[in-house]
Amino acid sequence: MSSKTVEFEKYACPLGCKPDDDLVLKGRDRLHKLPGEFSVVICRNCGLMRTDPRPTPESIKFYYPDSYGPFVPAEPKNLVERKGLLYRTGKWLFRLLVGDLNINPIPPMKSGRMLEIGCGTGSYLHSMALKGWQVHGIEVSPLAGEIARSHGHPVDIRNIESVPNPQEPFDLIVGWHVLEHLHQPVGTLKRMREWIKPTGSLVLAFPNMGSIEFKIFKDRWYPLSLPTHLFHFTPDTIKKVLKSAGWKVEKIFYQKCFTDIIASIVFVLEDYLGETSALTQYFLNLHKNGSHSLLILYPFARLLACFHQTSRMTVWAKKVDQ
């Protein structure tokens, strides 16, 4: 598929609001440098932001090349815990100063049946299987899905809309940065409601458009990720979206993430200094490779999290009786 064959569609607010939108910004694909200009609009009635017009379900594949991060093969973690005194002391001191940096927290619960939507190459499935969970995955990418399968995990490789209902309900359904990619998020959440036990939990993570980082960087904000992010949630609008699908938010975690700021600075430097400038390349390498020197920035990330201003959030939800 070439950029000339990509088709776009207009799409109304999925919460059923009357057409009444304001333009938030125009942006481009900064991650893969693919062509096109894309608009983000906000519904004046409910405040939900969305990419509109957007690539159709058939055309969106053009913006997911094989180099897309979740599709890149990665060795599953074996969860080997280092027990050395120096390591444990350093870990204790770090948690004392910064807190727990677990970006994928789930409710305290016994292991059972778990479904991961958009499981990629299966790293999270593998880590949960090692903890005693009976894992299942859904992945739209044949490349990533086959890698996940190669580790011995059952993965449905197709669009979630075409996945049949499970034979048994799940105790836990997770989606790490998936909901914002879906063309029909409300419909998908309604299906998830039918797939989970009455006592089960839904855990989702996505960018926080209500953060100060978005207000500062705007179209250069790294988690904006146009045009693959079709919806852009704030804490208020994700509650409305989940409620419309029969879910109730129990808790929102604001992830202590600072690396998105580094990546957003890269986009700013690319615009003003060019991609090949020494300063741009320095921050790009800092973002890609990480550095222990960045750990000194995490107390600031913890402060931002206290004020609900970090770039990413994780939501726990339960289905409500209807």
Image (cartoon, rainbow, N blue to C red):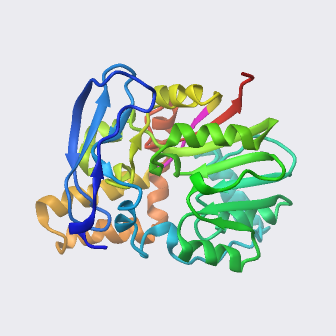
Magenta range = 252-257
Viewer-proximal residue, 151 or 259?
Answer: 151
- Residue shown at 12%/59% (left/top)? 272
Left or right of residue 252, residue 303 in this image: left
Q: Is residue 164 visible?
A: yes
Q: Eyeballing the image, is 315 above or below 85?
A: above
Viewer-proximal residue, 219 or 237?
Answer: 237
Viewer-proximal residue, 229 or 158?
Answer: 158
- Residue shown at 26%/27% (left/top)? 21
Q: Is residue 236 magenta?
A: no
- Residue shown at 82%/53% (left/top)? 167
Q: Is residue 254 magenta?
A: yes
Give how far across and how far down residue 165 sits, in percent.
73, 50
Q: Eyeballing the image, is 308 above or below 107?
A: above
Give how far across and how far down residue 307 sits, in percent.
47, 29
Please identify the quarter of the rendering in which residue 288 is found. Answer: bottom left
Q: Is residue 221 visible?
A: no
Give how far across and how far down residue 58 sits, in percent.
40, 61
Query: Split into 4 quadrants, where in the image is the C terminus?
Result: top right
- Residue shown at 30%/54% (left/top)? 264
